[in-house]
Amino acid sequence: MNVEIYLDRLHARIRSNRWMYYFCIFCRFSLAAGFLPAGYVKIIGERFTNLSNNQPMGHYLEALHHTGFYYTFIGVAQMLAALLLLFRRTALLGAVLYFPVILNICLLSIAVRFEGSLITSPLMVLANLYILCWHYDRIKPVLPFKQWGIIVPQLNNKQFPTLFFSGVLATVIVLTIVLTQFTYDIKPRNTHTECRLQCKRNKYPNACEVFCDDIHLDGKPLEQALERYHKASGRN
């Protein structure tokens, strides 16, 4: 069986299940709820968070706040994507617009070790991908497949997809554990106090305190603070 036939059959099986349809609706409204307030704040010109400018994500958001109409443009794009997701006919367009924005937020959160969206943004990327896959029949014409037309089945399967939702739950749990416990040995946290608290559990408490001071007191870039942390801990 070639890839095209397999994907067509998998899509048909998913689209026929009522519970999978409900999950798609849940993803659409959850993603919309995430972008509506974030976009509105940018449109009215307010700063997105109260993070200190010395904090890596706070430094980025402060600079973004001073980009003028570009800051407003991002807010408009976020609100437009969210509103499009709320309606069935425009959900695909909303998902297409939403994806590059949330992917950028995800990569940014991982890059600067920002706990505020370190877990939620990857989950939002996965939810966005699910919506795109749900509309595979409409996306297929732009893919390198020979057959374009797909017959979308009716929602006549009411069997609860236990295996699928067990996988969803397992994904959430594994992502949470990996991103919070095993991805980084140290994080800037949101404040100097919070950053210092992690030093009690750090293998190199003195190096950790140097890192926190570099970030929150001296305002050094993350890469420089990490370099000093690794030197102070004797690993560089």
Image: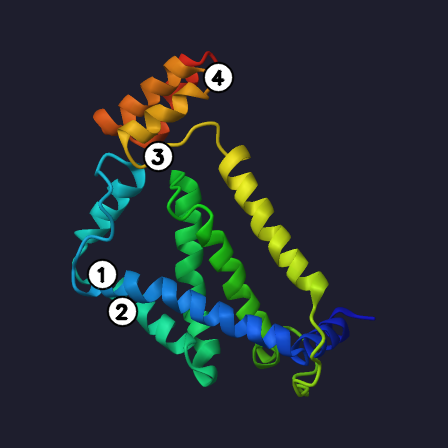
On-image quarter of the N terminus: bottom right
The quarter holding residue 132 reads bottom right
Residue found 45% across the figure and 56% down from its top: 103
Q: For the residue marked with disc 1, what is the amino acid?
A: Lys
Please name which of the two marks, 2 or 4, marks the residue nearer to the observer. Answer: 4
Question: Which residue is denoted by mark 4 in the rendering?
Answer: 203
Frontmost of labels 4 and 1 is 4
Q: Which residue is mark 3?
A: 189
Q: Tell me if label 1 and label 2 are in contact, CB under 8 Å.
A: yes
Residue at 16% x, 52% y: name it: 66
Give residue 76's mark: 2
In this view, 52 is above or below 223:
below
Disc 4 and disc 1: Cα gap in Å? 40 Å
Q: Quarter of the image holding residue 76?
A: bottom left
- Label pair 3/1, CB-CB below 8 angstroms: no
Question: In the image, what residue type sits under mark 3?
Answer: Arg
Mark 3 burial class by Cα count in 10 Å: few <14, some 14-19, many 20+: many
The Cα–Cα distance between marks 1 and 2, rounded to whole angstroms, is 8 Å
